Image (cartoon, helix red, strand yellow):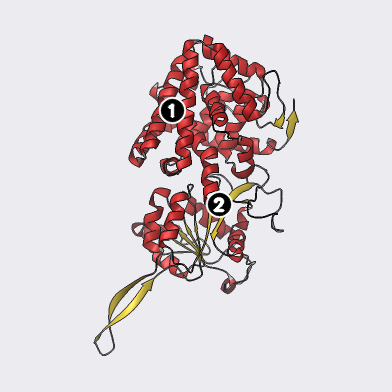
Amino acid sequence: MSFPVDVTPNHPIDQQPTIGLIGMGAMGAMYAKHLSDAGWKKISVCDLPEKYESLKQSYKDVPGVTVHKDGHSVSRISDFIMYSVEAEYINRVVQQYGPCMYFLSKRTTACQSLTTLPLSLATKVGAVVSGQTSVKAPEKAAFEEHLPGDVHIVSIHSLHGPSVSPASQPFVRVWLPFRSCLLPTHDASIPVNQVIMQYRASDESVRLVENIFKCFKSRYVYLSYEEHDLVTANVQAVTHAAFLTMGTAWAARRSYPWEQGHYVGGIETVKVNIMLRIYANKWHVYAGLAILNPSAKVQIDTYASSATELFKLMLAGDHDSLRQRVYAAREKVFGLREDEEGGKTIVFLTEDILDQFTISGSPKRGQSSPCNSHLSLLAMVDCWARSSIQPFDHLAVAATPVFRMWIGVAEYLFRSVERLDTALHAATHDVSHRSDDLEFVVAARGWSQCIAFGNFELYKDRFSRTAAFFEPRFEEANKIGGAMIKAISETGTNPVTN
């Protein structure tokens, strides 16, 4: 390397690495902003060639950022290169800008004779190449096939969206399968929200990546590609599927259920706001994670199966079998026996936290919706139990804000025998939500089939139709969702014994 191993933005410009960002969508722009704000002085960026002029205009006054016409210009000069493109397109983009390619160019000499010269386009020799896709199987395959053998591969994954501050994530411990301890520069109070995958790289290359992203104030988790995809399938894909299903089910009824008095206060507020927050995002954020991750397909199918089987017990009025199955899942996931109330664990959500947030027009404390079966939550815990997933273990490794909130509402329901029994009684004896539960099961199976087909256009159409219905409420939901994330982050580290 032509720069110090422990390089920082405070080093002179000639001692800093050139940081290349290929792909300037929401995440690429987020990276460029934080790196520029931190003081890195050589940031080369590009997007699609047709976006060159508009991108150049957008970054003309941004310190340290230089806009290039295409990925060739970035990959040839950059010491660190990050592909921030959708997983669906990662192979095509790396194939275009990663390999060493030679071609002939005819130039006219001073004597006006034609001379044929060999030119090359290639990733810079010795560069560190990374990818920011949320599913790593296609990224790994693309890097193996198309990158020259003289570059290093260190992939990353920021476990938050572009609208969430990297420094606002939950405080949890780090699991390091490849290392016995944290580097001395890492403060244990810094939240986990950056996964690093050292695949074909030296320790010095990993250290460079750590130093570049130190400005994000993140704490790092070190996983293999395979471990990453398994964990993200368990943490993200099936969680997203649950909320996608809720949205599709509610949209099918062509009404905002919380305005009909059915979904107000408490758990309902969290479910509605997370659903809206997800549909306010880009569809491709979730499509690649679900469709291209083999583990995700299995988990999402299991979730749909759990919802279907539990709903059949509800229709049959078989309260005893339903309760037996749900309490067995409760014990396996939360470690609570049937007669055990609470237990010593982390409490993410309390009545005080839940009552801070409300959709406009929703009642406040003391005014609640009719008893709800909470089929979406029952199915999630049943799915975790059937798949032998321990959500708190994944929370410690690679939690996202949405996953923390989803664990929070599940824990809130399942830690209380009274709340859980009320839900189970409603499931078999109260038909107030029965039509919603039917729509939920239909939607869950529909999303599972859509993902099994592996068709991105079908996914986009399904997502976009639901998003269009809820779009008028996105702005409000994003504000409330951000406040919920902050509130949970501030209270999620204190173990409480009931």
Task: Specify the farthest residue to the bottom.
Answer: 111
Which secondary structure lies at badge 1? helix
Asked if residue 144 is positioned above or below residue 317 in the image, the reply reads below
The local crowd at label 1, few if under 14, some if 14 to 19, many if 20 or more residues have their Cα within 10 Å, is many
Q: CA distance from mark 2 to mark 1?
A: 30 Å
Closest to the observer: 212 or 378?
A: 378
Which secondary structure lies at badge 2? loop
| Mark count | 2
Q: In the drawing, does residue 460 fall left or right of residue 315?
A: left
Residue at position x 63%, y 39% in the image: 393
What percent of the width, then of the height, locates residue 249?
A: 42, 24
Q: Amino acid at mark 2?
A: Ser
Q: Quadrant of the C terminus?
A: top right
Q: Quadrant of the N terminus?
A: bottom right
Asked if residue 350 is positioned above or below residue 396 in the image, the reply reads above
Q: Dot 1 corresponds to which residue? A: 444
Q: In the drawing, does residue 243 fall left or right of residue 442?
A: right
Q: In the drawing, does residue 356 fall left or right of residue 99?
A: right
Closest to the observer: 451 or 107?
A: 451
Asked if residue 150 is positioned above or below residue 285 in the image, the reply reads below
Image quarter of residue 91: bottom left
The local crowd at label 2, few if under 14, some if 14 to 19, many if 20 or more residues have their Cα within 10 Å, is some
What percent of the width, then of the height, locates residue 146?
A: 40, 62
Residue at position x 35%, y 60% in the image: 49
Q: Is residue 280 visible?
A: no
Q: Amino acid at mark 1?
A: Ala
- Judged by depth in the image, the label closer to the viewer, 2 or 1, is 2
Q: Is residue 184 visible?
A: yes
Q: Dot 2 corresponds to which residue? A: 224
What percent of the width, then of the height, locates residue 76?
A: 44, 69
